[in-house]
Image (tube, grey):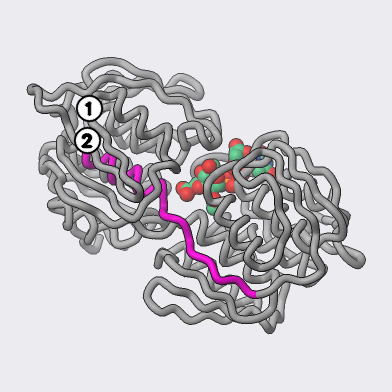
Amino acid sequence: MDKLIVEGGIALRGTVRISGAKNAALPLIAATLLAPGRHRLGNVPNLRDTRTFLKLMENLGVRHERQEDVLIIDSTNLRSAEAPYDLVKTMRASVLVLGPLLARMGKAKVSLPGGCAIGARPINFHITGLEKLGATCRLEHGYVDAEIDGRLQGDTVYFDIPTVTGTENLLMAAVLAEGTTILKNAAREPEIANLIDMLTGMGARIEGRNTDRLTIHGVDVLRPADCDIIPDRIEAGTYLIAIAATGGEGTVTHCNPAHLPSLLEKLRLAGLIVDEGESTISVRWPQAKPRALKSVDIKTMPFPGYPTDLQAQFMALMALSADICVITETIFENRFMHVAELQRMGAGIRIDGHSCVINGHGMNGLSGAQVMATDLRASSSLVIAGLAASGRTEISRIYHLERGYENLVEKLTGLGARVWKEQE
Ligand code: EPU
């Protein structure tokens, strides 16, 4: 197993190109199940999670070729409708094949993912939504076994909580249903708009893009897709926070500033200067010294609120602030696994229920230590802390990082960081 070594204390400077979004690539790959033929997806990141998802697709009979960031996916010959435990347990997003398999094949058998490092993460809204459209779902032997008699039937589905992959699953099921489906309290993340654009290009009829009420008029058949993945807003946010945390100055390119409204505002409130271009975001410190970061509260919320996937990274930044702030996690019940590791680096953080009180120790407040990555975003907060800390940080279990950050070491090195992988 590899570990990541970070020699901290260097201000990051320069530009970094953002890759396609993991959380858009996965549903878009799943959506190719809806229409037989050769699909083209552009700007697809080459990550552990996209590779795992393609392995799952291969298991179903879907072939693919990759030419740089373009994936050609041929979903003509489906031979299975089953997502086995071995694949689902390594990546919860495998559940995204449930809706499209049911719509195309009339049946789907998908392993229940089980708990994960950030919370219980049930899929009950996916299942009750599909049942509302006429599917029969049985939970047996750890699997959801779903089938339909004929076609799915359009209906109204109300989500108690705006669920991202739940909305995506229901969208993919409803596009081939008979009649009209209305999804109420749907999630509004930019990745969902990306999926809607792909489905529309395939011939689906969907109204309400970027709103919490989606109306889907079912069609009889869809055609193969040709669509680009949107930039990864979480990757972009992670680099902006890293640049800020190291006292640096830099620009993320090939991104969409409109996808990061809350983070950019929070960085400004913390005292940083943030400039938005059409597809670039720059962050820098004001001239005045000594540098003091203002403490800023955050509360995670569904989009356009502050993203839970950038909570851990902002906490690392706030550990360097000059005062006290509160970070509240409202999406997942157990997303503070990074706290104990950040504490090992000297961070003043106290967990209080769903909130953390961060007592910032200033820009020189962290010191390098041996820490352990526990999930994808927790790991990136440790990288940020390591970059800002004095001395050497060793982060073990970095396969978590490889799930969601393309060429992390190369990109950080390009910004001047001293960071490399070593075998444990
Ligand atoms: N929930 C339920 N029942 C359901 C579905 C969701 O109770 O049937 C709850 C969840 O437990 C959670 C809340 O609803 O408390 C919202 O979860 P959501 O379903 O939106 O999360 P997800 O779709 O499983 C996606 C991303 C996550 C991201 C969340 C929130 C993908 C593949 N994953 O997960 O990304 O944190 O939305 O924005 O899109 C990551 O990239 O590191 C990551 C975890």
Q: Quadrant of residue 26?
A: bottom right
229 inside magenta stretch: yes
Give the residue displayed 63% in from the left and 40% down from the top.
211
Residue 116 appears in the figure:
no
373 inside magenta stretch: no
| Residue that lies at the very extreme toward the top in this rendered image | 323
Q: Is residue 353 above or below residue 15?
A: above
Q: Is residue 293 above or below residue 147?
A: above
The residue tagged 2 is 245
Q: Position of residue 118 (x, y in %)?
A: 50, 41
Q: Which portion, as a residue range, is magenta? A: 224-245
Q: Position of residue 177 (x, y in %)?
A: 82, 60
Marking on residue 320:
1
Question: How would you rate the neighbour count of disc 2 (Cα within 10 Å): few for under 14, some for 14-19, many for 20 or more?
Answer: many
Give the residue displayed 50% in from the left and 21% down from the top.
353
Q: Quadrant of the N terminus?
A: bottom left
The answer to whether residue 382 is left or right of residue 221 is left
Sequence order check, earlier mark of 2 and 1: 2
Q: Where does ligand 1 appear, by image quarter?
A: top right
